[in-house]
Structures are given as C-alpha cells and as structure tokens.
Image: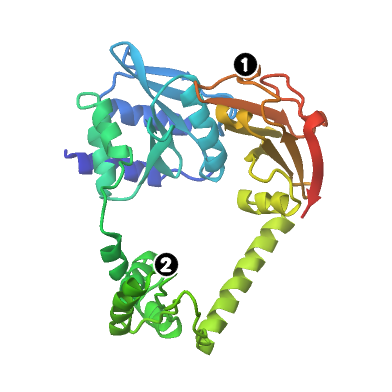
Amino acid sequence: MTDQEFFNVIVGIYSKLGNNVGDGVVQNIWESIFNKILGYNTNGEDFVKTIAPNHMSYGSNSIDFLLMHNKMATCRISFCKPEDFKIAQNYFLQVLLESQLTLGVLIGKSIYVYCYNNDKKAFDFKEIEITQSNPIGTWWVSAFKKNTFDHQQIADYIIVKPKPNVDLSKVIADITPELLYEILRVHLSKTIDLHQWEQISKTVKISVLANKVGTSDWLTRMDTMQNNNAVATVPINPMRQPMQPRPPIDRVSSAIVSNTIQQHKTQSQLDNGIIQRQTAVRLVLNEKIGHGANISFLLENKSLNKYFATVPMDYLKQDWVLIFNDSVKRQINVFLVPAKALNKKQFMSVDKLHFNIQVRCKDMAFQDEYNKLRFDRYFVKAIYY
C-alpha cells in the first residue's frame, strides 16, 4: 500500500469514532495505527507508553506515547477532545518544554505537529486534517514511519522560514479587487455553493485603497487601481489635504452592518463571561494602567479551576501587568508588578527564557502554586465588563 492509502485507512478508522469516546479507546486505536501502519513495536524499546498529564482531557487513565530513537525520546504523542483543544494545546506545549522535547504531535479533530523554532523561541505547527487523500496526511505517514523517521526533515517541513526580500511595490500592485474576490470565493467554497457565491458577489463590493504613500508611488498605484475599477483616496500634497470623497452608500451600509455584527458577537461573548486578550488589554489601557508595560493574560482552565501562563523572563525587567479573568463575576482583576520587583530565581523556569505560573481561580491571595509567590500585594483594581 502507498502512504496515501495508509492515511486513507486512518481516515476511515477515525471517521467511525463517535463524540463520546471512552477513556483509552482513542489511544488504543492510535497504538494500533503506530504498530500496524507506521511500523513501531508498541511493546519494544522504540515506543513507550506513559501516563498523560492529568490536565489533558481523556481522564486519569489516559496515556501518551513517546517515540524513541537510540534510546532517547524524540517525540511525544498526546490526545485531546476537539472541544478542549485550545486548553490542551497550551498544556501540551508546556509539557514539551518541561521535558526538553522539540517535536510533538497532538491529536484531536485533526493531527497537529509541533516543532520548536529556535529563532522565534516558540513552536511552529502544521494542522493535518483527517480527510481522504489529504496530501499533508500522506507526508505525515511517510515522515513518522519508524524506518523513514527523520527529526531534521520534519523540522525543515514544519518550521516557518523567513521570507526572502521582495519588491513590495510589485506585491502591492498585484492586490486587486479581482484577486480579493478569488481569495474570498476559495475561502467560502467549503460552506456555500456556486449560486450562493454569485448572489454574494453581486451584493458585496470590494475596493482596494492606497494608504499614506508618496506622490510618485501614488500616481503609479492610481493608474493600476483605475484600470481595475478600484477606489483610492490618498494625500497628494502633504501641505494641503484634498477633500475626501464621500463613500458610496452601499459601502457605508456594508461597513455599518459589519461593525454591528462584530459588536453583537463581542457583546455576546462578554455576556457569557468570555473576553478576548485584546479586549481585556484595551480595558486595562483605558484605565491608564501599565502604559508601556509587558502584559500577561492568564488562561482560565475551568475544568481545573486554575489560571495558567507561560511568561518570558524578560518581562521581569520592566513593569509587568497580569490580567486574571473572572468569568463568573464578569470582571478582570489587574495586577502591576514594578520592574525588577521580582527576579527569575523566584520562579520555576521552563527553559532559559520562560517560566510558568499557576493560580487557583478562587484564591484571594492569588498565590502561584509553582513558586508560592503571592500577587495580591500588586493588585491594582477590578474592571467589570
């Protein structure tokens, strides 16, 4: 069988799993896949089963897999329920850092392969949808087979490399309404049919607007835009700004509708005690707290009733703002730690550049369980939303 056929077998097996899968069932199936398809001796030295961290979502009986090469663990395989992915991913990456592994696979609704990028000091990843004849799935089978496993080749595929220098003026000139329509059509093709797309394309108008460029660039760009029926409004003379033309009424209506939808979406999330990091940060800055400070927005794990964050060591050198979201009271508790008030020796390091903090949600002292430091002394205020 080819690697593509092997991956299609995995898809077929996975598609038969229901949403309410009991503890150990998913892991047992994947253990069989690693044995029969990828060629690992699941009772040998190259494949080790270990207890999964208790914060992962399949219960206390769950197991993880460690792929071994030359008697050294090179990759951790872990599992999570699709609805718990975001929280599970955060903890999974923490486990990889703590165990000094630079390669990991988290399996939920899709297969996620993570590889540590030394340049960015963070993990890059690639999502592999478990769908028939997925070419990336074919790559995954080939890359993770025991006999063809190559850590460096996997890293070369996963890690995002810096883009070479390009002529941005040429790139900008290529941004046309036709291009944006095509990108939008492809993006929506999974959820709407061709007839529905035609209705949308007749209703929505896309324009390309130049923004704060020089006169010569503007003239060149304007010619391009006029040829493509685009609309542009830019300053021609920096000493005298031309009167801005009034946008067509359909564009104004479209902007109002878009903004209204976004506001309703944001308000709905806030009503449920869900607040995004950027919204919380904006509320803090509006209170004139920690201008220019480093900011940590602690994730709330409701199943464990704890807050968690991985923090860069450099945050301690400047003022450091911590934001804890209380989804029950619909408030954020804000703390400000002055620059150099704490030092890295007081924290449990994940690596040379990061440390972890974990606080129980109902702990009024806001004491870090890892390092036994109390943050209540740095409390500034509670902001309701």
Q: Secondary structure at mark 1?
A: helix
Say whether residue 289 is visible. Answer: yes
- The residue at 16%/38% (across/down) is 1
Q: Quadrant of residue 292?
A: top right
Query: In the drawing, what numbered circle is on residue 345?
Result: 1
Instruction: Quadrant for the C terminus, please.
Output: bottom right
- The residue at 53%/87% (across/down) is 246
Percent from the top left, x then y, of residue 122?
Answer: 44, 34
Query: In the drawing, what numbered circle is on residue 191?
Result: 2
Q: 186 or 344, which is in the foreground? A: 344
> Looking at the image, is mark 1 or mark 2 earlier in the sequence?
2
- The residue at 42%/67% (across/down) is 191
Question: Neighbour class for label 1 at 10 Å: few (<14), some, many (≥20)?
Answer: few
Left or right: residue 40 versus residue 365 is left
Percent from the top left, x then y, of residue 343?
Answer: 64, 21
- The amino acid type, in three-letter code, at marker 1 is Lys
- The residue at 32%/78% (across/down) is 219
Q: Is residue 366 above or below residue 371?
A: below
Distance in Å between CA atoms under marks 1 and 2: 52 Å
Q: 137 or 290, which is in the foreground? A: 290
Mark whose residue sits in front, 1 or 2: 1
